[in-house]
Amino acid sequence: MNVRHFISFLLVFVGTLTSGFGQADAVGKTDFSFVFMTDVHIRPDSAVVAAFNRLVDTVNKLDVDFVISGGDQVFDVMRGNKAKGDSLFTLYKTLSSRIKVPVHNTVGNHELFAIYPESMEDSTHADYKYGMFKRYFGDTYYAFDHKGWHFIVLNALDVAGQKYFGQIGEDQLRWLQRDLAGVSPETPIVVTLHIPLITAFNQVYPRPDQNNDAGPAIVDRDALLAVFKKHNLRLVLQGHLHWLEDLNVENRTHFITGGSVAGRPTWRGTNFGPRGFLLFDVKEEGFKWKYIGF
């Protein structure tokens, strides 16, 4: 082999290596991880604050891309009292700001301001219902994309007769249809909402004083799921129940209720499972999770 041929071979060989590394790099860049935590129930209690700070320290060591919080960040503002509500939201926002990656918050029932009869404020107050949440965190439903996956955070709550109930509502369903119109049918989708769409909780722990087959907790659940019929809904992340379950429906969608940070009863016990959060590792269109205590 003469010098010119050797140089040509070397350039081709190096180019092939560079191309191979680039392809490996591109594949690696589609992998990511994130945390799903739910039902933090933060309150100005030194033990609660210390526990949440331990969670933050744990999350910061995991090198994840972002965090999703599944609702009930604070405990609680349903009985009104603006000063108390502001102090709770400020406390959570201050503590969670130590998390080194973006935190995407979901509205939970305990963030619905002044909805109960005993509240000193009423429906005319600017912070009523979703108002306080919006003031601190923005819209109650929104979407974002990350490394080829589409994430949707929904508001699964409404109020009637000074009580909350599970509902998506026509306005949000129309927004969702518009959002999905720009999403390829093949794109993997993750939905987060506070009230579970599908759960086995009442079958595992039936209560004699309630109808355990009363239907979905979100009254327009079927209309919501119908919107995703022609889309690749891979994962639904849920909260509210303070217990952990993973329901694989038709080997298409996992409905995962994510335990709780606060335990059950709130910060007083661990009925139905330990305190913790979920760590998700995503590779292309697949994922795996594990539950992490703190």
Image: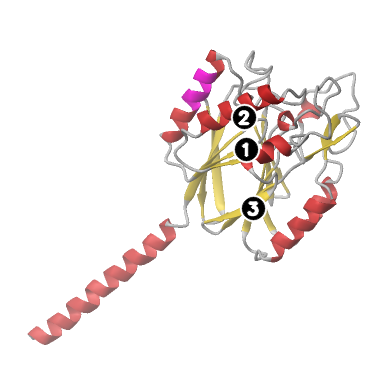
* Residue occupied by mark 3: 143
- Segment tinted magenta in the rendering: 49-55
* Residue occupied by mark 1: 136
Mark 2 is on which residue type?
Answer: Phe
Labels 2 and 1 touching (C-beta < 8 A): yes
Work out whether mark 3 precedes mark 1 in sequence or the reverse, and give the earlier one: 1
Looking at the image, which residue is at 67% across and 26% down?
85
Magenta stretch contains residue 175: no
**87 left or right of 219 in image:** left
Mark 3 is on which residue type?
Answer: Ala
Q: Is most of the magenta stretch helix, strand or loop?
A: helix
- In the rendered image of this protein, does residue 73 appear above or below residue 157? above
* Residue occupied by mark 2: 89
The front one of 6 and 76 is: 76
Camera-nearest label, 3 or 1: 1
CA gap, disc 3 and disc 1 = 18 Å
The front one of 104 and 285 is: 104
Q: x%, y% of residue 8?
A: 18, 83
Q: Is residue 228 visible?
A: no
Magenta stretch contains residue 51: yes
Is disc 3 placed on a helix, strand or loop?
A: strand
